[in-house]
Image (cartoon, helix red, strand yellow):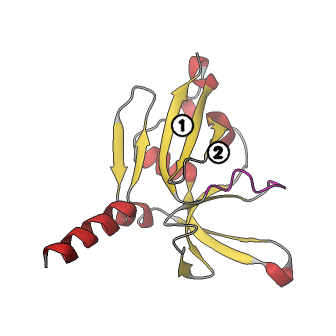
Amino acid sequence: MLLALTQLAVLASGQQLTIQDEGGKQTVLARADIEALPRLKVTTGASSSSATFEGVSLNSVLEKAGVGLGETMKGKRMASYLLVEAADGYRVVFALPEIDPAFGDKRVILAFLKDGKPLDAKEGPYRIVVFDEKRMARWVRQVTTLKIIAAP
């Protein structure tokens, strides 16, 4: 029984996402918190090898965690960036204005479903999907942490 509870705790923690703001304050969102946000679907690839990802906009996840976008994006904050970290140590960067809808139309999604099914252990529980990028180098699998960092 204790082993089963421990396994459930590990599984539940694997469904959490940590967001850290510029000041170092951390917010942990559970899967239910993320799934409660407005959903988006994106179909990628050629028709013979296409996949449909479903999730939420990355900016809505940041806003849910208290990261200000829109009108607060001015001055020194224009040099802030988002560091996305994965379970395997892979990391990528997005300029914060790059993912702010007040600045452009870039669609960056935190996906949790692929073709209607939860992402498998190799990809999930969360994956970054960047709709308009030619290379998938910033399509981070197994996302664990989002950190906002002010450039020095």
Toward the left, the furthest residue is: 1
Front residue (pair 81, 90): 90
- The mark found on residue 101 in the picture is 2
CB atoms at circles 2 and 1 under 8 Å apart? yes
For label 1, the residue is 69
Is 18 left, or right, of 70 in this rendering? left
- The mark found on residue 124 in the picture is none
Identify residue type, mark 1. Leu
Q: Is residue 81 magenta?
A: no
Q: Position of residue 102 (x, y in %)?
A: 65, 40
Taking the spot 35% from the left edge, 33% from the top edge, the residue there is 25
Is 99 left, or right, of 148 in this rendering? right
Taking the spot 60% from the left edge, 48% from the top edge, the residue there is 90
Q: Is residue 25 above or below residue 101?
A: above
Q: Residues within 10 Å of mark 2 (few under 14, many from 20)?
A: some
Q: Position of residue 139 (x, y in %)?
A: 67, 56
Q: Is residue 31 above or below residue 78?
A: below
Magenta segment, which residues? 133-140
Secondary structure of the residue carrying numbered label 2 = loop
Q: Position of residue 149 (x, y in %)?
A: 53, 29
**For the residues marked 2 and 1, what is the alpha-carbon distance in whole angstroms?**
8 Å
Q: Residues within 10 Å of mark 1 (few under 14, many from 20)?
A: many
Q: How would you classify the magenta stretch by its main secondary structure?
A: loop
The image quadrant that residue 93 belongs to is top right
Front residue (pair 57, 121): 121
Is 83 left, or right, of 1 in this rendering? right
